[in-house]
Amino acid sequence: MSQKGVNAQYRRTDGYVYRLTVGEHLLVSLHARGEEPFYALTPTGALLWESLAEWSTLDDLCARLIGEYEVTRDQAAVDVMDFLEQLESLQAVESRQLES
Amino acid sequence: MTATIPKVSGAILKKRLVVNARQQRIPLQADVEIIATCNFNCVHCYIAPCAEREDVMSLEQAEILFDKLKAAGTLMLLLTGGEVFTHKQFKEIYLAAKRRGFNVYINTNAYLIGERWADFLALWPPKFMSISLYGMTPESYERVTGIPKSYQRVMRAIDLLLERGIEFDLKCPAMTVTASEIPAMMAFAKAKGVRFRTDYSIIPQEKGDLAPMSLQLGPQEVMDLQKTLDPGLSDFRKYAAVRVDDSTYENVYKCGAGRTTLHINVHGGVSTCSSSRKTVGNLFEQPFEEIWSALGGKVEMKYPVGHPCATCKFAKICIGCPATVEQLTGLPNGYVQMYCKITHQRAYELGYHPTGVPRTVTEGIPRHVVTPGRATARSLPILSQ
């Protein structure tokens, strides 16, 4: 787990809108051009996206997953970091460092 | 359990959405007419000539609609008119749709798209735009639109959108006043790197005036144009090959109308699509479920026994559809001989009628065949073509 992950807070940007339609959890881009300006999320991804409405630490996000699913903290942490990296690559999440 | 964004291409995801929406009967796509008036006076138009100044959807009304559609599962939202850019609150309505997470499409004549609108669209890109084109010279353009400088303004708008990478296609109805320039329009679109499409079916005005029908191309004119656009009909041959079969069609509606799509007019009236002006209810006054159910009932309509379209092997390459038939005859399961003539002429050109187009098509269907709306259909002058 990177230091940034442990010592940071994350929040979703306002460049995407979440939609649940036809059984698909979708992130719809407000500013992207392209063939299909939306992405599918897994249900757990959708759960984290909801949490990211507020500034959240890795611990906050892991706790949300552990609260909903039977998963170890280590497993949850790996998943959350992967997900955050994916969101960062889409500029769908912003981060700030916590004071140490 | 994995929190992730699965690596699924947008196209595959869209296909999955469409298939599942069809199975679950979810209105994935909605066309919303936010204004019925237009800044062009096109000779063939079926909406704007019937429109009054007050035929405009307010921002508040649009937001009510958008909320209902979002709750129902709509993802693709087409904003159409009239001319949407003449709406005084178009920007607000467009952003209201975008911020609700719709993939927004726009139909426009592009006349009002200058630098400012182009910059706005670059910042807030629509999923796709469809621009109407009416000619390749100022004179021919104005003959259709009735508006000076319409050609120059639209050409400039096209360049502004291209410079900003906004995705759009160009389209033009094939009719007597545009047919000769449609090949040039197609070449123009190709040179610009955008898709061009045309449609061979003209429909009467919303309130029944048949004036636009005088612009309808006849069977041979349709074929002549189609052969110019598609030498040897090679593309059309491939298209027809997978659609011409001996199936019988109990259902009048074979498209997604009322199953995954709907159209909402400027007053909230809901119909199957933009070509159908017969509404089944009003979204400003009734719950969505009630109207969606009524629309579902409409598109379950069956052909009566003996209807020629029910057993026509060329039904899937017919230039008409239940909506245009409804506009012409008053009923979606009516019969329009003009469509029959054009479609069988196409079939003949593809080699499906080795002994020529059947007399039932050229001379009319036999008297014993029951066709709803027949009296109405037969009273239309276009049927004599």
Image: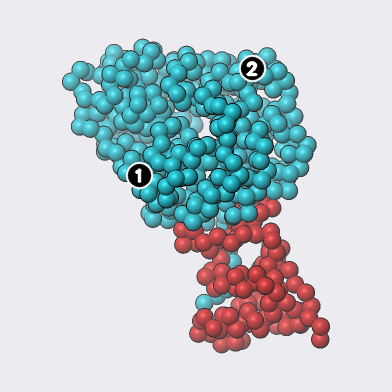
Chain colours: A red, B cyan
The local secondary structure at tag 1 comes to helix
The crowd level at tag 2 (other Cα within 10 Å; few <14, some 14-19, many 20+) is some
Name of the residue lying farthest toward the left: B368
Q: Chain of mark 1?
A: B
Name of the residue lying farthest toward the right: A99
Q: Kindly tell me whether residue B242 is visible in this rendering.
A: no
Q: Position of residue B45 (x, y in %)?
A: 53, 23
The label shown at residue B146 is 2
Vertical arrangement, residue B122 with respect to residue A47, above or below: above
Residue B329 in the figure: left or right of residue B311: right
Q: Kindly tell me whether residue B365 is visible in this rendering.
A: yes
The residue at the point 60 percent across, 20 percent down is B41
Q: Can you tell which quarter of the image residue B318 is in?
A: top left
Q: Which residue, given by chain and number where applicable, does mark 1 sit on?
A: B294
Residue B227 in the figure: left or right of residue A62: left
The label shown at residue A73 is none
Q: Can you tell which quarter of the image residue B163 is in?
A: top right
Q: How many marks can you see?
A: 2
Q: Position of residue B206 (x, y in %)?
A: 46, 26
**Label 1 sits on what residue type?**
Ala
The residue at the point 56 percent across, 15 percent down is B177
Q: Do circles 1 and 2 both sit on a common chain?
A: yes
Vertical arrangement, residue B311 with respect to residue A98, above or below: above
Residue B200 in the figure: left or right of residue B344: right
**Marks 1 & 2, CB-CB < 8 Å contact:** no
**Label 2 sits on what residue type?**
Gly
Q: Quadrant of the C terminus of chain B?
A: top left
Q: CA distance from mark 1 to mark 2?
A: 39 Å
Q: Nearer the viewer, residue A34 or A70?
A: A70
Q: Position of residue B382 (x, y in %)?
A: 40, 15
